Image: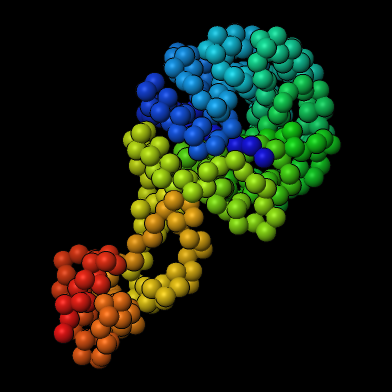
Protein backbone atom coordinates (compact mmCIF):
# COMPACT_ATOMS: atom_id res chain seq x y z
CA UNK A 1 0.00 0.00 0.00
CA UNK A 2 1.24 3.49 -0.85
CA UNK A 3 0.55 6.86 0.75
CA UNK A 4 -0.05 10.16 -1.03
CA UNK A 5 0.45 13.18 1.20
CA UNK A 6 -1.89 16.06 0.38
CA UNK A 7 -0.86 18.49 3.16
CA UNK A 8 0.58 21.15 0.86
CA UNK A 9 -2.33 21.20 -1.57
CA UNK A 10 -5.22 20.76 0.87
CA UNK A 11 -3.63 23.05 3.44
CA UNK A 12 -3.65 25.96 1.01
CA UNK A 13 -7.29 25.39 0.10
CA UNK A 14 -8.25 26.75 3.51
CA UNK A 15 -9.21 30.40 3.65
CA UNK A 16 -6.26 32.62 4.57
CA UNK A 17 -3.56 29.95 4.34
CA UNK A 18 -0.57 30.08 1.99
CA UNK A 19 2.84 28.43 2.12
CA UNK A 20 6.09 29.81 0.73
CA UNK A 21 8.18 27.97 -1.83
CA UNK A 22 10.81 27.37 0.84
CA UNK A 23 8.23 25.87 3.19
CA UNK A 24 6.96 23.52 0.51
CA UNK A 25 10.45 22.36 -0.41
CA UNK A 26 11.34 21.67 3.23
CA UNK A 27 8.09 19.79 3.86
CA UNK A 28 8.44 17.68 0.72
CA UNK A 29 12.00 16.76 1.70
CA UNK A 30 10.87 15.73 5.19
CA UNK A 31 7.98 13.66 3.88
CA UNK A 32 10.17 11.90 1.33
CA UNK A 33 12.78 11.09 3.97
CA UNK A 34 10.00 9.67 6.14
CA UNK A 35 9.12 7.25 3.35
CA UNK A 36 5.98 8.76 1.79
CA UNK A 37 5.64 7.58 -1.82
CA UNK A 38 3.69 10.50 -3.34
CA UNK A 39 3.58 14.19 -2.38
CA UNK A 40 0.95 16.46 -3.88
CA UNK A 41 2.46 19.92 -4.32
CA UNK A 42 -0.48 21.89 -5.64
CA UNK A 43 -2.70 22.84 -8.57
CA UNK A 44 -0.19 23.91 -11.26
CA UNK A 45 -2.64 25.78 -13.49
CA UNK A 46 -3.60 28.00 -10.55
CA UNK A 47 -0.15 28.66 -9.10
CA UNK A 48 3.45 29.24 -10.15
CA UNK A 49 4.91 27.74 -7.01
CA UNK A 50 4.62 24.12 -8.07
CA UNK A 51 7.09 24.71 -10.89
CA UNK A 52 9.47 26.54 -8.54
CA UNK A 53 9.31 23.76 -5.97
CA UNK A 54 9.88 21.03 -8.55
CA UNK A 55 12.92 22.88 -9.90
CA UNK A 56 14.62 22.80 -6.48
CA UNK A 57 13.56 19.34 -5.27
CA UNK A 58 15.73 16.25 -5.39
CA UNK A 59 13.76 13.59 -3.52
CA UNK A 60 12.85 9.93 -3.77
CA UNK A 61 9.09 10.50 -3.47
CA UNK A 62 7.11 11.24 -6.61
CA UNK A 63 5.62 14.71 -6.86
CA UNK A 64 2.05 15.15 -8.06
CA UNK A 65 -0.07 18.01 -9.27
CA UNK A 66 -3.82 18.02 -9.78
CA UNK A 67 -5.44 18.96 -13.06
CA UNK A 68 -8.99 19.24 -14.30
CA UNK A 69 -9.83 17.09 -17.28
CA UNK A 70 -8.96 19.86 -19.68
CA UNK A 71 -5.92 20.46 -21.87
CA UNK A 72 -4.62 23.69 -20.32
CA UNK A 73 -4.50 22.12 -16.85
CA UNK A 74 -2.57 19.14 -18.16
CA UNK A 75 -0.14 21.44 -19.98
CA UNK A 76 0.42 23.42 -16.78
CA UNK A 77 1.11 20.28 -14.76
CA UNK A 78 3.54 18.94 -17.33
CA UNK A 79 5.29 22.32 -17.56
CA UNK A 80 5.59 22.47 -13.77
CA UNK A 81 7.63 19.28 -13.84
CA UNK A 82 5.61 17.08 -11.51
CA UNK A 83 6.18 13.35 -11.78
CA UNK A 84 2.47 12.53 -11.69
CA UNK A 85 -0.48 14.29 -13.27
CA UNK A 86 -3.58 13.62 -11.17
CA UNK A 87 -6.64 14.35 -13.31
CA UNK A 88 -9.96 14.86 -11.58
CA UNK A 89 -13.58 15.24 -12.62
CA UNK A 90 -16.90 15.26 -10.72
CA UNK A 91 -18.57 11.91 -11.29
CA UNK A 92 -21.68 11.92 -9.08
CA UNK A 93 -24.87 12.98 -10.85
CA UNK A 94 -25.24 15.84 -8.37
CA UNK A 95 -21.82 17.35 -8.93
CA UNK A 96 -21.56 16.47 -12.61
CA UNK A 97 -24.79 18.24 -13.50
CA UNK A 98 -24.26 21.30 -11.29
CA UNK A 99 -20.52 21.81 -11.80
CA UNK A 100 -20.06 20.80 -15.43
CA UNK A 101 -23.60 20.80 -16.78
CA UNK A 102 -22.97 17.75 -18.96
CA UNK A 103 -24.53 14.30 -19.22
CA UNK A 104 -22.73 11.07 -18.43
CA UNK A 105 -21.65 10.38 -22.01
CA UNK A 106 -20.11 13.81 -22.38
CA UNK A 107 -18.26 13.38 -19.08
CA UNK A 108 -16.87 10.02 -20.20
CA UNK A 109 -15.76 11.54 -23.49
CA UNK A 110 -13.94 14.35 -21.68
CA UNK A 111 -12.24 11.91 -19.30
CA UNK A 112 -11.09 9.66 -22.17
CA UNK A 113 -9.67 12.56 -24.16
CA UNK A 114 -7.89 14.16 -21.21
CA UNK A 115 -6.33 10.88 -20.12
CA UNK A 116 -5.02 10.24 -23.62
CA UNK A 117 -3.57 13.75 -23.70
CA UNK A 118 -2.01 13.37 -20.25
CA UNK A 119 -0.31 10.13 -21.25
CA UNK A 120 1.30 11.93 -24.19
CA UNK A 121 3.33 13.96 -21.67
CA UNK A 122 5.17 10.79 -20.69
CA UNK A 123 4.31 11.24 -17.03
CA UNK A 124 2.59 8.88 -14.64
CA UNK A 125 -1.15 9.52 -14.73
CA UNK A 126 -3.72 9.11 -11.97
CA UNK A 127 -7.44 9.83 -12.12
CA UNK A 128 -9.59 10.99 -9.20
CA UNK A 129 -13.35 10.54 -9.22
CA UNK A 130 -14.50 13.66 -7.41
CA UNK A 131 -17.48 12.80 -5.18
CA UNK A 132 -16.84 9.21 -6.22
CA UNK A 133 -18.37 7.67 -3.11
CA UNK A 134 -21.70 9.34 -3.97
CA UNK A 135 -21.50 8.16 -7.57
CA UNK A 136 -23.92 5.44 -8.65
CA UNK A 137 -21.90 2.21 -8.51
CA UNK A 138 -22.73 1.06 -12.04
CA UNK A 139 -21.48 4.34 -13.50
CA UNK A 140 -18.42 4.31 -11.23
CA UNK A 141 -17.55 0.84 -12.52
CA UNK A 142 -17.96 2.06 -16.09
CA UNK A 143 -15.56 4.93 -15.43
CA UNK A 144 -12.98 2.65 -13.81
CA UNK A 145 -13.17 0.14 -16.66
CA UNK A 146 -12.42 2.88 -19.20
CA UNK A 147 -9.75 4.77 -17.29
CA UNK A 148 -6.16 4.06 -18.27
CA UNK A 149 -4.31 5.24 -15.15
CA UNK A 150 -1.90 3.88 -12.55
CA UNK A 151 -4.44 4.68 -9.85
CA UNK A 152 -8.13 5.57 -9.86
CA UNK A 153 -8.89 7.43 -6.66
CA UNK A 154 -12.41 7.48 -5.26
CA UNK A 155 -12.98 10.66 -3.29
CA UNK A 156 -15.32 11.28 -0.38
CA UNK A 157 -15.34 14.93 -1.37
CA UNK A 158 -17.89 16.16 1.15
CA UNK A 159 -16.92 13.83 4.00
CA UNK A 160 -20.28 12.08 4.03
CA UNK A 161 -19.23 8.44 4.30
CA UNK A 162 -19.10 5.95 7.15
CA UNK A 163 -16.90 2.82 7.29
CA UNK A 164 -19.85 0.60 6.39
CA UNK A 165 -20.71 2.77 3.39
CA UNK A 166 -17.07 2.66 2.27
CA UNK A 167 -17.04 -1.12 2.52
CA UNK A 168 -20.28 -1.39 0.55
CA UNK A 169 -18.88 0.73 -2.28
CA UNK A 170 -15.60 -1.17 -2.45
CA UNK A 171 -17.42 -4.51 -2.38
CA UNK A 172 -19.42 -3.46 -5.45
CA UNK A 173 -16.40 -2.43 -7.51
CA UNK A 174 -15.62 -4.80 -10.36
CA UNK A 175 -11.89 -4.16 -10.42
CA UNK A 176 -8.57 -4.95 -8.77
CA UNK A 177 -8.64 -2.85 -5.60
CA UNK A 178 -4.87 -2.64 -5.51
CA UNK A 179 -5.18 -0.04 -8.29
CA UNK A 180 -7.77 1.96 -6.35
CA UNK A 181 -6.93 4.92 -4.18
CA UNK A 182 -9.17 6.63 -1.61
CA UNK A 183 -9.47 10.22 -0.44
CA UNK A 184 -11.47 11.12 2.65
CA UNK A 185 -12.56 14.32 4.38
CA UNK A 186 -13.23 14.49 8.11
CA UNK A 187 -16.56 16.32 8.19
CA UNK A 188 -18.11 13.51 10.26
CA UNK A 189 -14.91 12.79 12.17
CA UNK A 190 -14.53 9.50 10.30
CA UNK A 191 -11.70 10.14 7.83
CA UNK A 192 -9.20 7.86 9.56
CA UNK A 193 -11.81 5.18 10.28
CA UNK A 194 -12.87 5.24 6.62
CA UNK A 195 -9.26 4.96 5.47
CA UNK A 196 -8.75 1.96 7.74
CA UNK A 197 -11.86 0.31 6.33
CA UNK A 198 -10.56 0.87 2.80
CA UNK A 199 -7.14 -0.42 3.77
CA UNK A 200 -8.65 -3.62 5.15
CA UNK A 201 -10.40 -4.12 1.80
CA UNK A 202 -7.09 -3.99 -0.05
CA UNK A 203 -6.98 -0.59 -1.75
CA UNK A 204 -3.55 0.34 -3.06
CA UNK A 205 -3.29 4.00 -2.10
CA UNK A 206 -4.48 6.21 0.76
CA UNK A 207 -4.48 10.03 0.68
CA UNK A 208 -3.28 11.49 4.00
CA UNK A 209 -2.19 14.82 5.46
CA UNK A 210 -0.08 15.81 8.44
CA UNK A 211 -2.35 16.31 11.48
CA UNK A 212 -5.29 16.02 9.08
CA UNK A 213 -4.58 19.51 7.69
CA UNK A 214 -7.04 20.27 4.91
CA UNK A 215 -10.08 22.28 3.89
CA UNK A 216 -13.18 22.33 6.10
CA UNK A 217 -12.70 19.65 8.79
CA UNK A 218 -9.53 18.31 7.17
CA UNK A 219 -8.53 14.92 5.82
CA UNK A 220 -7.26 11.53 6.97
CA UNK A 221 -4.44 12.30 9.41
CA UNK A 222 -1.16 10.69 8.34
CA UNK A 223 -0.07 9.90 11.89
CA UNK A 224 -3.46 8.50 12.92
CA UNK A 225 -3.66 6.21 9.93
CA UNK A 226 -0.08 4.90 10.20
CA UNK A 227 -0.30 4.13 13.91
CA UNK A 228 -3.86 2.77 13.89
CA UNK A 229 -3.13 0.64 10.84
CA UNK A 230 -0.01 -0.78 12.49
CA UNK A 231 -2.17 -2.09 15.32
CA UNK A 232 -4.31 -4.23 13.03
CA UNK A 233 -3.71 -7.96 13.43
CA UNK A 234 -3.04 -8.45 9.71
CA UNK A 235 -1.88 -4.97 8.80
CA UNK A 236 -0.34 -4.13 5.45
CA UNK A 237 3.25 -2.96 5.76
CA UNK A 238 3.88 0.69 4.87
CA UNK A 239 7.15 2.25 3.81
CA UNK A 240 7.03 4.86 6.58
CA UNK A 241 9.92 5.14 9.06
CA UNK A 242 7.73 4.62 12.14
CA UNK A 243 10.52 5.42 14.60
CA UNK A 244 10.72 8.96 13.21
CA UNK A 245 7.02 9.53 12.60
CA UNK A 246 6.15 11.87 15.46
CA UNK A 247 9.28 14.07 15.42
CA UNK A 248 9.18 14.33 11.62
CA UNK A 249 5.57 15.49 11.61
CA UNK A 250 6.17 17.88 14.51
CA UNK A 251 8.99 19.39 12.45
CA UNK A 252 6.68 19.75 9.43
CA UNK A 253 4.05 21.53 11.53
CA UNK A 254 6.76 23.90 12.76
CA UNK A 255 7.92 24.57 9.19
CA UNK A 256 4.37 25.42 8.14
CA UNK A 257 3.62 27.46 11.27
CA UNK A 258 0.60 25.24 11.86
CA UNK A 259 -1.00 25.23 15.30
CA UNK A 260 -2.89 22.19 16.54
CA UNK A 261 -5.05 21.69 19.61
CA UNK A 262 -3.34 20.22 22.71
CA UNK A 263 -5.75 17.28 22.61
CA UNK A 264 -5.21 16.51 18.91
CA UNK A 265 -4.66 12.73 18.71
CA UNK A 266 -0.99 11.70 18.67
CA UNK A 267 0.53 15.11 17.86
CA UNK A 268 -1.25 17.24 20.47
CA UNK A 269 0.97 18.51 23.30
CA UNK A 270 -1.27 17.03 25.97
CA UNK A 271 -1.83 13.58 24.47
CA UNK A 272 1.05 11.86 26.26
CA UNK A 273 0.88 13.92 29.44
CA UNK A 274 -0.53 12.13 32.48
CA UNK A 275 -1.26 13.84 35.79
CA UNK A 276 -4.17 11.97 37.39
CA UNK A 277 -3.00 10.29 40.58
CA UNK A 278 -4.52 6.96 39.60
CA UNK A 279 -2.94 7.10 36.16
CA UNK A 280 0.56 8.11 37.18
CA UNK A 281 0.70 5.58 40.02
CA UNK A 282 -0.08 2.74 37.62
CA UNK A 283 2.09 4.05 34.79
CA UNK A 284 5.17 4.29 36.96
CA UNK A 285 5.08 0.49 36.95
CA UNK A 286 3.33 -0.36 33.67
CA UNK A 287 2.75 2.50 31.18
CA UNK A 288 0.44 0.34 29.06
CA UNK A 289 -2.23 0.58 31.77
CA UNK A 290 -3.25 3.98 30.40
CA UNK A 291 -1.70 4.17 26.92
CA UNK A 292 -2.85 2.47 23.70
CA UNK A 293 0.74 2.25 22.46
CA UNK A 294 4.22 3.26 23.52
CA UNK A 295 4.89 6.69 21.98
CA UNK A 296 8.59 5.84 21.85
CA UNK A 297 7.81 3.30 19.10
CA UNK A 298 6.97 6.26 16.87
CA UNK A 299 9.60 8.69 18.14
CA UNK A 300 7.37 10.29 20.79
CA UNK A 301 7.75 10.65 24.54
CA UNK A 302 5.37 10.39 27.46
CA UNK A 303 5.36 12.90 30.31
CA UNK A 304 4.20 11.89 33.77
CA UNK A 305 3.30 15.01 35.75
CA UNK A 306 3.11 15.35 39.51
CA UNK A 307 1.44 18.08 41.54
CA UNK A 308 -1.72 18.77 43.56
CA UNK A 309 -3.61 15.90 41.96
CA UNK A 310 -0.94 13.32 42.85
CA UNK A 311 -2.23 10.62 45.19
CA UNK A 312 -0.67 8.43 47.83
CA UNK A 313 0.02 5.59 45.40
CA UNK A 314 2.10 7.77 43.08
CA UNK A 315 3.86 9.43 46.05
CA UNK A 316 4.81 6.01 47.36
CA UNK A 317 6.33 5.01 44.02
CA UNK A 318 8.22 8.32 43.77
CA UNK A 319 9.78 7.68 47.16
CA UNK A 320 10.73 4.16 46.10
CA UNK A 321 12.41 5.57 42.99
CA UNK A 322 14.28 7.93 45.29
CA UNK A 323 15.46 4.85 47.25
CA UNK A 324 13.55 5.91 50.35
CA UNK A 325 11.26 3.83 52.52
CA UNK A 326 7.71 5.08 51.69
CA UNK A 327 6.52 5.56 55.24
CA UNK A 328 3.18 7.22 55.90
CA UNK A 329 4.98 10.31 57.20
CA UNK A 330 7.18 10.63 54.10
CA UNK A 331 4.20 10.15 51.82
CA UNK A 332 2.33 12.90 53.64
CA UNK A 333 5.34 15.23 53.48
CA UNK A 334 5.87 14.58 49.77
CA UNK A 335 2.22 15.20 48.97
CA UNK A 336 2.43 18.47 50.88
CA UNK A 337 5.53 19.51 48.94
CA UNK A 338 3.87 18.66 45.63
CA UNK A 339 0.82 20.69 46.68
CA UNK A 340 3.05 23.71 47.31
CA UNK A 341 4.76 23.66 43.91
CA UNK A 342 3.98 26.50 41.51
CA UNK A 343 3.91 24.09 38.57
CA UNK A 344 3.45 20.44 37.73
CA UNK A 345 6.71 18.52 37.94
CA UNK A 346 8.00 16.02 35.42
CA UNK A 347 9.12 12.62 36.66
CA UNK A 348 12.80 13.49 37.18
CA UNK A 349 11.88 16.66 39.03
CA UNK A 350 9.39 14.81 41.21
CA UNK A 351 11.94 12.12 42.11
CA UNK A 352 14.47 14.83 42.97
CA UNK A 353 11.87 16.43 45.25
CA UNK A 354 11.18 13.06 46.87
CA UNK A 355 14.86 12.62 47.67
CA UNK A 356 14.69 15.71 49.88
CA UNK A 357 11.87 14.30 51.98
CA UNK A 358 13.16 13.07 55.35
- Labels in figure, total: 0
Colour basis: rainbow
Residue 138 vertical placement versus 262 (above, below)? above
Q: Residue at x 77, y 23 (%)?
A: 147
Q: Residue at x 49, y 34 (%)?
A: 33
Name the outermost residue toward the bottom.
328
Residue 52 occupies quadrant: top left
Q: Is residue 155 visible to us here?
A: yes
Is 317 left, or right, of 226 in this rendering? left
Q: Which percent across, then down, holds residue 330?
A: 21, 86
Q: Which percent across, then down, holds residue 39?
A: 54, 29
Q: Residue at x 37, y 33 (%)?
A: 256
Is 3 left, or right, of 176 in this rendering? left
Residue 240 vertical placement versus 331 (above, below)? above
Q: Which percent across, then down, holds residue 92?
A: 70, 30
Residue closer to the observer: 296 or 229: 296
Residue closer to the observer: 217 or 315: 315
Residue 240 vertical placement versus 144 (above, below)? below
Residue closer to the observer: 94 or 168: 168
Dividing the image into 4 quarters, which one contains the C terminus? bottom left
Q: Residue at x 39, y 21 (%)?
A: 21
Name the outermost residue toward the front.
323
Q: Is residue 156 visible to us here?
A: no
Is 114 left, or right, of 246 in this rendering? right
Dividing the image into 4 quarters, which one contains the N terminus? top right
Residue 137 occupies quadrant: top right
Residue 171 vertical placement versus 318 (above, below)? above
Q: Which percent across, then down, holds residue 294?
A: 48, 60
Amino acid sequence: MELLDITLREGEQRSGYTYTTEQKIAVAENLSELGIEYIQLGFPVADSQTKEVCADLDITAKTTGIARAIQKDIDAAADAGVDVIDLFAPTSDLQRSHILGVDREELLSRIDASLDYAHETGREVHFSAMDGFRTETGFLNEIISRVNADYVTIADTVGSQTPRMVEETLTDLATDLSQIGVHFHDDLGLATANALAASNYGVGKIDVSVAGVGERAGNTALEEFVIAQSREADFTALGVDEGQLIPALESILDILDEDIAPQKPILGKGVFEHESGLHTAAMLDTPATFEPFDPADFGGQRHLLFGPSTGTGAAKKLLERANLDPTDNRIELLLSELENQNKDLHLKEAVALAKDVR
